[in-house]
Amino acid sequence: MVKASWFAGAETGDGVLLARHAPSQWSDPSFLTLAAASFGLQLGIQNTSILLVLRTPGALQSIIKHQGKVGADFGATVVFYGMGAEAATTSNLGADIVAFAAPNVGAYMGGSLEGSVLITRRDLNEAVYGVGATPQGIIAGKRKSGIAQSLKHALTR
């Protein structure tokens, strides 16, 4: 994710969505873009890696169907060192999301209220899985690809 802010902020980045079906079984990835807008006491620019943990099946279904979340975050980044914390919920209230942020580089400090949307990357999903591939079908295992074997193996460990 790349985030830039001066009281109002914007951020965007690409990612993948995988679901754990059993302790050692992961779905193939569906491709997404995260775009967000925020407002608060914040200033700076940063490049951050983010891991969103969807804690319930309802959260996963809400992200796939409604593609939105709202939340609050606090963070600080100075060159290569940083920290961040975020809590959020989807449109399916009670479907918790926990976010872990690892700032890579930048100069940013602040706290904000944020609204964001996860946008399905139909172009990438169809390039990997074929025409008509949807996040629902990919996560359910109806579309298969060997593209993420090393990622799924690392998650299994």
Image (cartoon, rainbow, N blue to C red):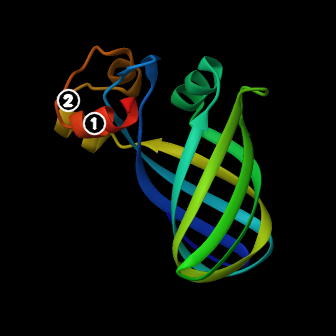
Q: Is residue 48 above or below residue 105?
A: above
Circle count: 2
Q: Position of residue 82 (x, y in %)?
A: 62, 73
Task: Kindly identify the residue that appears in the image at 53 percent across and 54 percent down.
Answer: 50
Determine the image quadrant of residue 65. Answer: top right
The numbered disc on residue 3 is none
Tell whether label 2 touches label 1 (CB within 8 Å): yes
113 or 131: nearer the eye?
113
Determine the image quadrant of residue 78. Answer: bottom right
Mark 1 residue type? Asn
Task: Kindly identify the residue that appears in the image at 59 percent across and 37 percent down.
Answer: 53
Residue at which label 2 appears: 129
| Mark 2 residue element | helix
> Which quarter of the rendered picture does the C terminus lie within?
top left
Mark 2 residue type? Tyr
129 displayed left or right of 50? left
Q: Residues within 10 Å of mark 2 (few under 14, many from 20)?
A: some
Q: Position of residue 79 (x, y in %)?
A: 55, 85
Real-space CA distance between mark 1 and mark 2, rounded to the nearest whole angstrom: 6 Å
Furthest toward the front, the residue is 157
Q: Is residue 94 above or below residue 43?
A: above
Q: Residues within 10 Å of mark 1 (few under 14, many from 20)?
A: many
Task: Kindly identify the residue that appears in the image at 66 percent across and 77 percent down.
Answer: 5
The numbered disc on residue 125 is 1
Q: Position of residue 99 (x, y in %)?
A: 64, 48
9 displayed left or right of 1? right
| Mark 1 residue element | helix
Q: Position of residue 32 (x, y in %)?
A: 42, 44
